[in-house]
Every structure is written in structure tokens, then in C-alpha cells.
């Protein structure tokens, strides 16, 4: 199912879908709905300034968005990508199930702008407060890059095999050895059209973006149909919908 806790398929998302999302992104960044409901870099800087080493607060545009929550509901470009068969087929293959046995959970755009894109702390997805199921086997995060992603612009980094522990250990808030993660991580290079699935217990994170290159990722979560949740945001558009239900939503 996974190699060392993650799985990558290269060049399987239609470049037309990627390009349409990239072209509409500047409009979303000016959309007051998402500025009001998303997370801005100003918000993040105030709470976690350590994620912006050597960056001054006044360097950052007040309304620049770090996380844009589920644009599928307002922008058909993102809904079209969310509904592409390759994405659902990949998700189903990670679960070892058919497409009819999984549901969409949520998506967002996570950004690391050139020069001041923040680092992402070492973490696991299972057990956190962004729509976690009660079993790690019932949830899956997927990264679809809109831009080339590499070490220089803050690519996702993983700790191979760190998913090989019991669910109970994660839910008891096991301590992540930051020094070990800093020394033993692998940075994952991705190109637009690639897709990466991450086991929900895999430790992952990423450095900041000090390059001249933007790095925008689409983050999707899928769950097994009927999965129970520890944390669940029922206000999310398309939440817990099957493929056919999402098409007709």
C-alpha cells in the first residue's frame, strides 16, 4: 500500500486541470470570503514567529493567505480537479479499496510564497483536529502540487517508516523526537501532475521557502466510507460524499 509510509505516482493529473487552478489562484487570493475564513500569514506569524526565521513581520502582506479552505465550493476549476478519476483512483489504491468504498473529506490550498513561505512543524495527520477518523487506516492525505516542489522552496519532507506504530501511541500524544526528524528526513521532489499519498501516521513537515519560486500545494483528505471521526467539521462542503454524490452536489 505504501512505501516507507508514502506513495507517489508521477504525471497522472492532467496538466490542463493543474493550469486552470494555477490561473484562477490570484483571484482567490483577493476573494474577501477566503481572506475572512482562511488563515493568513499575519495570523500565523503572530502565533508562531519561529516558523519565519529572519523574516520581518512587515515583509508580509496583511491579507496574504497561508491556507485557503475548500475552494471547490466556489471555483469549478478546483472542483474539476477534485473530481478527476485519477485522484479518486489513486486514493482508492492507497486504501486497497474500490472508488465506491471511499469518500471525499476536505481539501485546502496550502501556500509557501517565495521568500517568506513558513516552515511546517513535524507532525502526524492522524489524531489532529483537522477531521481525524478514529482509526488511522480510515483516513488518507494527498498532496497535489500546483508548482514544482523541491528542497529550496520548502518541499514536503518525511520520516520514512515513522508510521509503523500503534494508533494508541499517537492518540496518547507521543512525543516526536525533533532532533531525530531534523537529521533523518527525506525531502520529496514533486512536479505539477504528480500526486503523493501520505499514511496518516507518517511524520512529515517541511522547511521554509526562501527561493524566488512559489510553492502552492493542494491538500486532499479521503476517508473510508462509513468511517467514524474523532474530530469532524461537518460544515465542510462536500464532506463525506462519495464520488457520485460529489459530482451531483
Image: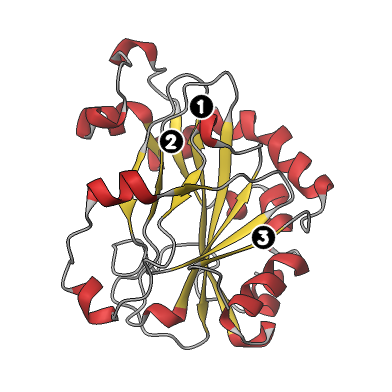
- Mark closer to the chain start, 2 or 3: 2
Q: Are marks 3 and 1 in contact (CB under 8 Å)?
A: no
- Mark closer to the chain start, 3 or 1: 3
Residue 165 at x, y percent in the picture = 31, 77
Q: Circle 3 — which element?
A: helix
Q: Give left or right: position of 184 versus 178.
A: right
What kind of colouring is applied to the model shown?
Answer: secondary structure
Q: Does residue 218 show up?
A: yes
Above or below, 198 relative to 15? below
Instruction: Mark 2 vs mark 1: give the one in front.
Output: 1
Question: Residue at coordinates 22% horizontally, 81% vertically from top-left?
Answer: 168
Question: Residue at coordinates 61% horizontally, 54% vertically from top-left?
Answer: 72
Find the distance from the CA under tag 2 to the CA under tag 1.
9 Å
Q: Give left or right: position of 78 versus 37.
A: right
Above or below, 71 relative to 83? above
Check disc 3 and report the residue beneath it.
82
Residue 141 at x, y percent in the picture = 50, 64
Find the distance from the CA under tag 3 to the CA under tag 1.
23 Å
Q: In this orientation, which residue lies closer to the viewer: 218 or 186?
A: 186
Mark 2 surroundings within 10 Å by alpha-carbon count, few (fewer than 14), some (14 through 19), many (20 or more): many
Q: Give left or right: position of 65 versus 177.
A: right
Count of marks placed on residues: 3
Above or below, 175 relative to 117? below
Check disc 1 and report the residue beneath it.
113
Q: In this orientation, which residue lies closer to the viewer: 203 or 216?
A: 203
Check disc 2 and report the residue beneath it.
66
Mark 3 surroundings within 10 Å by alpha-carbon count, few (fewer than 14), some (14 through 19), many (20 or more): many
Residue 176 at x, y percent in the picture = 22, 57
Question: Residue at coordinates 38% horizontally, 70% vertically from top-left?
Answer: 163
Q: Quadrant of the N terminus?
A: bottom right
Q: Quadrant of residue 35?
A: top left
Question: Residue at coordinates 41% horizontally, 63% vertically from top-left?
Answer: 235
Amino acid at each position: 500500500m505504501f512505501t516507507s509510509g508514502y506513495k507517489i505516482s508521477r504525471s497522472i493529473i492532467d496538466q490542463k486541470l493543474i493550469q486552470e487552478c494555477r490561473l484562477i489562484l490570484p483571484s482567490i487570493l483577493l476573494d474577501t470570503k477566503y481572506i475572512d475564513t482562511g488563515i493568513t500569514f499575519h495570523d500565523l506569524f503572530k502565533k508562531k514567529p519561529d516558523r519565519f526565521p529572519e523574516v520581518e513581520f512587515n515583509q508580509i502582506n496583511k491579507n496574504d493567505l497561508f491556507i485557503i479552505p475548500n475552494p471547490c465550493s466556489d471555483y469549478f476549476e478546483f472542483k474539476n480537479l477534485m473530481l478527476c478519476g485519477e485522484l479518486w483512483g489513486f486514493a482508492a489504491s492507497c486504501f486497497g479499496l474500490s472508488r465506491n468504498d471511499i469518500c471525499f473529506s476536505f481539501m485546502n490550498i496550502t501556500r509557501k510564497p517565495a521568500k517568506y513561505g513558513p516552515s511546517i512543524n513535524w507532525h502526524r495527520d492522524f489524531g489532529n483536529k483537522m477531521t481525524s477518523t478514529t482509526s488511522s487506516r480510515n483516513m488518507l492525505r494527498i498532496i497535489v502540487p500546483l508548482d514544482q516542489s523541491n528542497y529550496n522552496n520548502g518541499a514536503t519532507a518525511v520520516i520514512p517508516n515513522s508510521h509503523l506504530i500503534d494508533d494508541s501511541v499517537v492518540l496518547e500524544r507521543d512525543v516526536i523526537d525533533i532532533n531525530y526528524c531534523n537529521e533523518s528526513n527525506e525531502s520529496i521532489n514533486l512536479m505539477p501532475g504528480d500526486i503523493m499519498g501520505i499514511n496518516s501516521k507518517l511524520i512529515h513537515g517541511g522547511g521554509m521557502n526562501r527561493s524566488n519560486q512559489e510553492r502552492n500545494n493542494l491538500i486532499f483528505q479521503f476517508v473510508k466510507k462509513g468511517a467514524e471521526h474523532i474530530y469532524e467539521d461537518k460544515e465542510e462542503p462536500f464532506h463525506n460524499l462519495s464520488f457520485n454524490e460529489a459530482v451531483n452536489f
